[in-house]
Amino acid sequence: MILRSALADVLTAFSNVYSGWILWNLFLAAVPLFLSFLLFRRNELSKTKVWGAFALMTAVGVVGLWPRLPRIMQAQMRIMGALSTGDRTVQMKLGWWVLLMGISLAMSIFLFKREKSRRTILWWISLVAFIAFLPNAPYVLTDIVHLIRGISSGVLRVWVVALVFIPLHAIAIILSFEAYTLSIINLAAYLKQKGSEQFILPTELLLHALSAIGIYLGRFVRLNSWDLATDPTSVLVTTLNTLTTKRPATVVFVTFIILAVLYWVMKQITLGIKLRIHYSKQGVDALDL
């Protein structure tokens, strides 16, 4: 009875407070990581690893998307209703979405089948998609608001917060930021391979800046990465307004500093672990160095 009651408390907390955001945000964080391997380290991966990672990422995304299906279905019904009335704007938007789906399909085929590092138009489009989705990884840092909301709602019991949701938050934040770190490390390795090592630091700083802007637009303006494709004009205007207003610009700058510092720390940890694994394979104990 005690175990059943405890499980009921946890399930209630998930249903009323979190609604699957953890898995959905982890899926969004995995998208740029997955793209970074396909774009910058494709030759190092076997097809089995690629398809395995894709299947796992898709499964996480489906489970995370499940609680949002009612809202998605309602939005689709509104679009169908507008189409039935002959709304030209909706027709044009739907045509644009179909074109984007075609481009996405072509990108997928190209990225999965290519064996050599060829920078075609699809490669560049994929790079834009990588940059557009990259802010989703560090965005999880701001999801601490869910924990605050859960604590203040009175729905969560103290033990559920301490033993379930604080560890879940910590794991989600670490995994998502590690995805951010690995994504940029993969790009840095690609630049070094191409003989452009001098561009690594400027590129890292630029990505931190773009991610800081993306985090602000996502958290406060409630834009999504795919809005860059579906409604680019609105995204451009909103971004310009953000960068020319004092308060948003301050928040973006502080976020940039936080991302740069945390990235540097996680980069040292990640490369240190990689180096230790390398030495271990050679039979060298890191304690002897």
Image: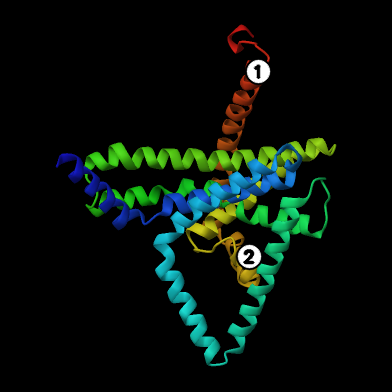
Q: Residue at x 50, y 48 (%)?
A: 26
Q: In the drawing, does residue 142 fall left or right of residue 121?
A: left
Name the image quarter holding residue 204: top right
Q: Nearer the viewer, residue 158 or 247?
A: 158
Q: Amino acid at mark 2?
A: Leu
The structure's colour scheme is rainbow
Secondary structure type for disc 2: helix
Name the image quarter holding residue 285: top right
Q: Position of residue 157 (x, y in %)?
A: 22, 45
Label 1: how many residues lie within 10 Å, few (<14), some (14-19) or many (20+)? few
Q: Residue at x 33, y 43 (%)?
A: 165
Secondary structure type for disc 1: helix
Number of the front mark, 2 or 1: 1
Q: Which residue is mark 1?
A: 281
Q: Is residue 251 visible?
A: no
Q: Position of residue 205 (x, y in %)?
A: 68, 43
Label 2: how many residues lie within 10 Å, few (<14), some (14-19) or many (20+)? some
